[in-house]
């Protein structure tokens, strides 16, 4: 059965993957974004493009626009990709008509998982390992500087990826950097640094309305851009090991509904898998999940429309992923030794691989990369995300 679907955040790599997967299945696909020249509108699978009010600037205008658009177009499903649209759509999902479906948790649960301190407390409650984490609401900063093992990372509580993270290698650096956060009236967490040499893993999952996992995919992030914790530009699927089920208990504990992405490091110091954060939304490298055999867009759509999704199944654990345009190029550009960087990219390449943008079925998306990159470079507020700041694409 064909559905009429609105995919928000057409700038995002995940949005493009959803457009392609659901469009290829025969659905009518509309894409939405707060600016016209976005990536997904250039996909051959996008039937219509709409521009909505910037949700970062005015959530009330965004709410009103989406409710009016949904009523006019009579969408079967609306799918958000990024943090801001996920929580804003969750806030109005009960105000949409009965025929327009979503698969989202309520706003309070989304905000709990988005808050690194609240997520840390939840993990501790069910014995999921995390890096040692401190907060000034529990310990004064002077005491934290004395007991922490360095280096440490000062992290904003409600940002994802590498945004706003500051590293401190000494007690004096920690005090100084923390003072800067405090002067901006921010209350970050302080987390001991875990060496990435043991491996950086991601879990992508979807839970149904009864809080049962209906899709699980695990992959290792081989290269990130930016290096400090941006999205994966090269990754590889891996098998589901017992530790994955332990980490997923966090979502069961909170009675989660919808998609979620979990960042995990293997700490070689104590040989434990440690949860870094939970992103209560779709993840950027989702095309790796799809091409490995876990078709997240179709599974979410099936659950949202009360169809029967497939049971949890095995997938290709040898599939590689690359985000060549533009992020591999940006990663090389920012390396001191560009020849060595190019060799590293070739070393990680494999015949059995998929891409974030490049597709022989959808070559016009390359034009979207160019158009969106020009838009970002020419827009002062967006320029930094092109030049290196991590974001939730």
Image: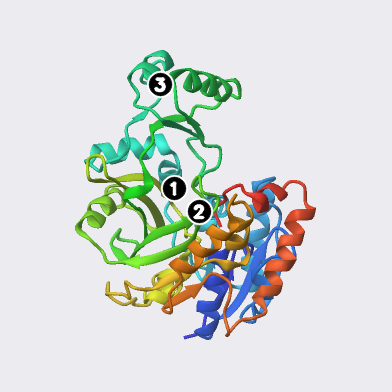
- Rounded to the nearest whole Å, what is the CA distance between mark 2 and mark 1? 9 Å
In this picture, is 358 found above or below 1? Answer: above
Q: Which of the image's four quarters has the C terminus?
A: bottom right
Confirm or deny contact between disc 2 and disc 1 (CB under 8 A): yes
Which of the 4 image quadrants contains residue 219?
Answer: bottom left
| Residue found at x 47% / y 59% | 283
Query: Quick one: 49 or 227, which is closer to the camera?
Result: 227
Q: Earlier in the sequence, mark 3 or mark 1?
A: 1
Q: Is residue 96 visible?
A: no
- Rounded to the nearest whole Å, what is the CA distance between mark 3 and mark 2? 29 Å
Give coordinates of residue 257: x percent, y percent: 37, 57
State the residue position of label 1.
110
Query: Quick one: 196 or 261, which is closer to the camera?
Result: 196
Q: Residues within 10 Å of mark 1 (few under 14, many from 20)?
A: many
Secondary element type, mark 1:
helix
Left or right: 75, with 247 as reference point = right
Query: Quick one: 292 or 268, which is closer to the camera?
Result: 268
Q: Residue furthest right?
A: 378
Q: Residue furthest left?
A: 242
State the residue position of label 2.
90
């Amino acid at each position: 059965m064909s559905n009429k679907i609105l995919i928000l955040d057409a700038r995002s790599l995940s949005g493009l993957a959803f457009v392609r997967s659901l469009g290829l299945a025969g659905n009518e696909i509309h894409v939405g974004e707060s600016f016209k020249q976005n990536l997904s509108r250039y996909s051959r699978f996008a039937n219509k493009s709409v521009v909505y009010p910037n949700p970062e600037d005015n959530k009330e205008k965004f709410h009103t626009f989406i409710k009016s658009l949904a009523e006019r177009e009579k969408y079967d499903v609306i799918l958000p990709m990024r943090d801001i649209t996920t929580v804003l759509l969750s806030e109005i999902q009960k105000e949409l008509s009965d025929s327009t479906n979503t698969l989202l948790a309520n706003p309070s649960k989304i905000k709990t998982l988005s808050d690194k301190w609240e997520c840390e407390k939840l993990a501790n409650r069910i014995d999921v390992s995390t890096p040692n984490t401190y907060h000034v609401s529990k310990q004064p900063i002077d005491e934290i500087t004395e007991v922490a093992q360095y280096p440490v990372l000062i992290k904003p509580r409600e940002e994802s990826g590498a945004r706003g993270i500051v590293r401190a290698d000494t007690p004096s650096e920690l005090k100084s950097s923390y003072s800067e956060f405090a002067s901006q009236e921010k209350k970050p967490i302080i987390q001991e640094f875990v060496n990435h040499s043991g491996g950086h893993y991601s879990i992508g999952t979807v839970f149904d309305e009864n809080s049962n996992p209906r899709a699980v995919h695990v992959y290792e992030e081989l290269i990130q851009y930016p290096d400090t914790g941006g999205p994966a530009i090269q990754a590889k699927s891996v098998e589901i090991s017992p530790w994955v089920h332990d980490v997923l208990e966090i979502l069961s504990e909170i009675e989660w509904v919808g998609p979620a992405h979990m960042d995990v490091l293997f700490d070689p110091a104590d040989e434990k898998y440690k949860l870094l954060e939970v992103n209560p939304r779709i993840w950027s490298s989702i095309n790796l999940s799809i091409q490995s055999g876990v078709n997240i867009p179709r599974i979410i759509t099936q659950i949202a429309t009360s169809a029967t999704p497939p049971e949890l199944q095995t997938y290709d654990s040898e599939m590689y992923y690359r985000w060549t345009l533009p992020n591999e190029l940006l990663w090389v550009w920012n390396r001191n030794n560009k020849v060595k960087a190019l060799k590293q990219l070739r070393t990680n390449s494999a015949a059995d691989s998929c891409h974030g943008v490049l597709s022989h079925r959808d070559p016009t998306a390359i034009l979207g990369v160019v158009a969106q990159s020009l838009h970002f470079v020419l827009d002062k507020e967006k320029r930094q995300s092109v030049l290196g700041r991590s974001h939730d694409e």
